[in-house]
Amino acid sequence: MTELTERQKTLLVLIIREYIETAQPVGSKPLVERYRLDLSSATVRNEMAVLTEMGYLRQPHTSAGRVPTEEGYRFFVSQMMQQAELPESIQHTIAHQFYQVRPDIDQWMTLAASVLAHQSQGVSVVTAPHAETARFKHIELISTQGRQVLMVMVMAGGEVSQQILTLAEPVSQERLSQCASRLNGLLSGLAIEAISVLPARSDALDQDILTLILQDMRRMEQRVSGNIYTDGLTNVLSEPEFSDSDEARRALRMFEERSTLQDLLARSVTNSAVGGLQVLIGSEGGWEELRQCSMVLARYGVQGLATGMLGVLGPMRMSYARTIPTVRFVAGLLSDLVNDAMGGEQDEIRNP
Amino acid sequence: MTELTERQKTLLVLIIREYIETAQPVGSKPLVERYRLDLSSATVRNEMAVLTEMGYLRQPHTSAGRVPTEEGYRFFVSQMMQQAELPESIQHTIAHQFYQVRPDIDQWMTLAASVLAHQSQGVSVVTAPHAETARFKHIELISTQGRQVLMVMVMAGGEVSQQILTLAEPVSQERLSQCASRLNGLLSGLAIEAISVLPARSDALDQDILTLILQDMRRMEQRVSGNIYTDGLTNVLSEPEFSDSDEARRALRMFEERSTLQDLLARSVTNSAVGGLQVLIGSEGGWEELRQCSMVLARYGVQGLATGMLGVLGPMRMSYARTIPTVRFVAGLLSDLVNDAMGGEQDEIRNP
DNA sequence: GTTAGCACTCTCAAGTCGGGAGTGCTAACT
DNA sequence: AGTTAGCACTCCCGACTTGAGAGTGCTAAC
């Protein structure tokens, strides 16, 4: 596979840019006119033929303009990656929004999803920060009525788990508080393995609660990611490639289905280099339903404490030039927020 | 406006049922054949003419079959409302799912949304239980690092609010716990109005936290509903009336937009009689974008403690026969769960 | 290596057309 | 009086045709 000449590169980029904008196969003549190229359409045609030969372009049918192939997009994106900073004004606007909402993980996630969807005109996903190894931080027991107790557990990474327990017999709030405070003292900062049996003198309630805590911590560790937030599901419907609604439906359905989405993200998590940005184009993602789509993914957070993923799904011809820098910027922002809120000595994931 | 004869009623119901199933204008001849009516198509035609005259049916164009009008659907639904119990087997399946998930409001809401969307093949909404007047129950302060503190507040209805505070100066976990326990003692069970200034001897930290608590409680009261959960956004895309994607997009978009959705629900909350079931057909909802849609809504929870809404959005020709009993059943189920978890003396909302 | 010219291909929108489904009316029947 | 068969009429819808337009690839000249 020979190298592309400089002119071929420029042409390829222009063609893809044009196609992303218009969603129409791009022809040689309109291209020279639109960009005032110092070339004749015939020359462009020749180059197009070469690029088609090499697999970067294809024609939907004889005598139609050219359309980028997955290869083409891949080349385009690799060009894009280096540069592409988000304009300062937009950076400020976004950051401003984050500092305006109530400081709470849930709010931040929702906002991040909203910002991503808005900026990229695609479907966004954000997963809440999640620790690979669960470390206990704090527990709280609140009696609601009779034998029902609300248990709120906070992990070192900031993850919160709530559940409602039914005890064997009614217990006063006072006893619950004492139990919680004992356990807090004993378990603070410990990971699952470090938690052993309780001192002999502890009562049955302590034991029961401890069992539940361990159960819950194991559940947390098994999860591949924190809660999933999405936004912009409808954005993609306006894209012409999804006008035949069945294709769109299948793609959106799998995106709405949390479990599938989690699989998808999980796979990317393992692949993704720390702090790196990943662009999955078309079949690269490996999901049949998303063959026509691309995803821009990034990992954010504080390595070793809590990390999450965020990304955008769009048609293959999504505006990478907008999406990539946005994803990168928001990832940085969330990393900062997580670091400020829970961080400490650990390494924060920063942009490469 | 004269009454409908018995035969006209039967016919109307059959026509609508047929239309709901096929999404095609229904003609006289196919109708008699399909349902083996002891009538000729001509007679049916005559009756159809009458029903059209009365506004229950319309024809898309001369010499096409009949299609129900909003009036028609309204009549149909009013017939439906009385009866319509969900089959026992399905009731069990659903109930089983609820008792299988981890007992946690968030899980229940997600599951409820999922069940509704699945059963009705429509878009579901569920709002978390929300109290009209916020009553303090418990607070917890957890130091994360330096001056950052995670504050978790639980309200009497079970609502939980988290946020991350930045204090003026670092405070030890011990002092935070003492502060929390003092405030818990003082404020337990109180509504906003009942909370006055603290005893003179309390320190600055107590004061600061109290201010934040009040702020947060006010915020909770201002909200019209708890968190919103939706599911099945994509279901509606397979409906033929939304094949021209623009209509679908606008409808879904407004449904995805939380704020609009909240408005919509808020309006219904005020309208809805306690425990009642509400069916909004077409323009009844008052939302331009949902002119082609219907909603089945219900309120659940424990009156005076915490209530929420749940419902299903679908095309006007949605399967009311499936949706109505499902919504009613799930509402009952959630009421039970809320009552078990937090209830007590208050009146639980039950099915009429 | 580049470009003008040209024949060729293929899509897309508009127009045409006939079959079919369904109606409403009338007149006969019960 | 209500019901039904028969029939003319209307209108949609899919299939087909057609012509314009856009774009290509090739060839030959620059």
Image (spheres, coloured by chain):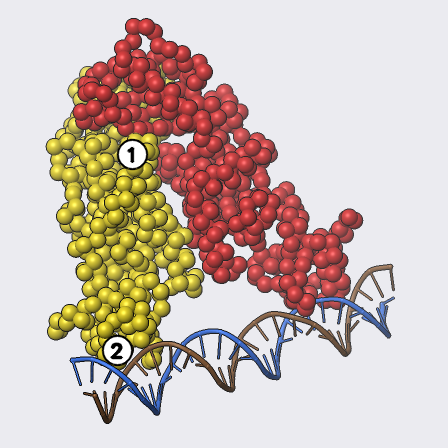
Chain colours: A yellow, B red, C blue, D brown
Which label was assigned to residue B18?
A: none
Please give the count of numbered marks on the rendered protein.
2
Which dot, 2 or 1, sits closer to the camera? 2
Q: In this view, does A178 lie to the left or right of B57?
A: left
Residue D13: % across, % down: 56, 72
| Secondary-structure class at tag 2 | loop
Q: Residue at x 63, y 42 (%)?
A: B82
**In this orientation, does residue A70 appear?**
no
In-image side of A52 versus A27 (left or right): left
Q: Can residue A341 be seen in this view?
A: yes
C-beta proximity under 8 Å, tags 2 and 1: no
* Distance of label 2 from label 1 (alpha carbons): 53 Å
Residue B198 locus on image (x, y percent): 35, 10
Marks 2, 1 in one chain: yes
Q: Quadrant of residue B202?
A: top left
Which is more N-terminal, label 1 or label 2?
A: 2
Q: Name the residue under label 2.
A: A40
Classify A321 as above or below A37: above
Say which amino acid is labelled 2: Ser
Residue A10 versus residue B279 in the image, above or below: below
Q: Which of A25 and A273 is in front in this view?
A: A25
Task: Depth check: give the residue in front, B85 or B10.
Answer: B10
Query: Tag 1: Cα neighbours inside 10 Å, few (<14), some, or many (≥20)?
Result: few
Chain label for disc 2: A
Measuring from the top left, give residue B178's x and y in whole percent: 25, 14
Residue bearing the label numbered 1: A99
Q: Which of B126 and B264 is in front in this view?
A: B264
The amino acid type of the residue labelled 1 equals: Tyr
